[in-house]
Image (cartoon, rainbow, N blue to C red):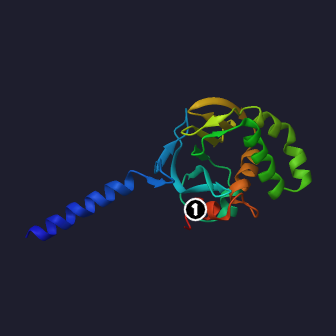
Amino acid sequence: MRLPSLFIALCMIITSQQLAGMETGGVKIPDTTSLHGTDHALVLNGAGIRKKFFMNIYAGALYLPAKTSDAAAIIGDNGPAAVDMHIIYGKISKEKITDGWEDGLKANLDQGRLDALRPRLDRFNALFAEVHEGDIIRIAYLPSSGTEVRINNEQRGIVEGNDFFRALLEIWLGSSPVSKSLKAEMLGLD
């Protein structure tokens, strides 16, 4: 008689832990999020660690309206989405952050497309500042306004155009991602 009750209680505990989110690189990643000032509810598609020279730099989390492992569909979509970067490394300069955007876009876009995005990329880069361990950068696409940048939930600015946000997604999900393992993790494949 007690065995079924114990089994049910154990299942409830496991389920509640799964609903609380996941942990990667010592960072707790929520299973769901909402975009500031909207009613867009997003679910965690996947999360992983960006490593460079054997050091953990940030935990990256991809949020979408519904889970999918199809990178091309995510990049080609025009709905709301967000990437959260939970900084793990001690300190990252503005220059390192903006160089990372530049390198990631150059690896995934042809020169004509990059040139067309240049004015908006320059405005986007101007939104960043030095970040430290524990900081959270959110890059979110709001269909009604564009790509919103928040650092520690403080809005830094918005850059117009779905095409701009989708180009940024190619940094993580494109044919030459910043990290193949992070791409797989964000797609929920690992």
Work out whether 184 lies above or below 32: below
In percent of the image, x 46 and y 54: which residue is there?
A: 23
Q: Toward which corner of the image does residue 38 lie, by quadrant?
A: top right
Disc 1 residue type?
Glu
Seen from the viewer's position, the closer of residues 147 and 10 is 10
Seen from the viewer's position, the closer of residues 57 and 168 is 57
In percent of the image, x 64 and y 61: which residue is there?
A: 183
116 lies left or right of 92: right
Q: Residues within 10 Å of mark 1 (few under 14, many from 20)?
A: many
Q: How many marks?
A: 1
Q: Residue 158: where, in percent of width, then height?
A: 70, 33
The quadrant the C terminus occupies is bottom right
Q: Residue 166: where, in percent of width, then height?
A: 72, 51
Seen from the viewer's position, the closer of residues 79 and 148 is 148
Where disc 1 sits, the SS reads: helix
142 lies left or right of 114: left
Q: Residue furthest left?
A: 1
Work out whether 184 lies above or below 62: below
Q: Residue 4: where, in percent of width, then height?
A: 15, 69
The quadrant the N terminus occupies is bottom left
Location of mark 1 (residue): 185
In percent of the image, x 57 and y 40: which residue is there?
A: 133
Q: Toward which corner of the image does residue 13 lie, by quadrant?
A: bottom left
109 lies left or right of 72: right
Q: Residue 184: where, in percent of width, then height?
A: 61, 65
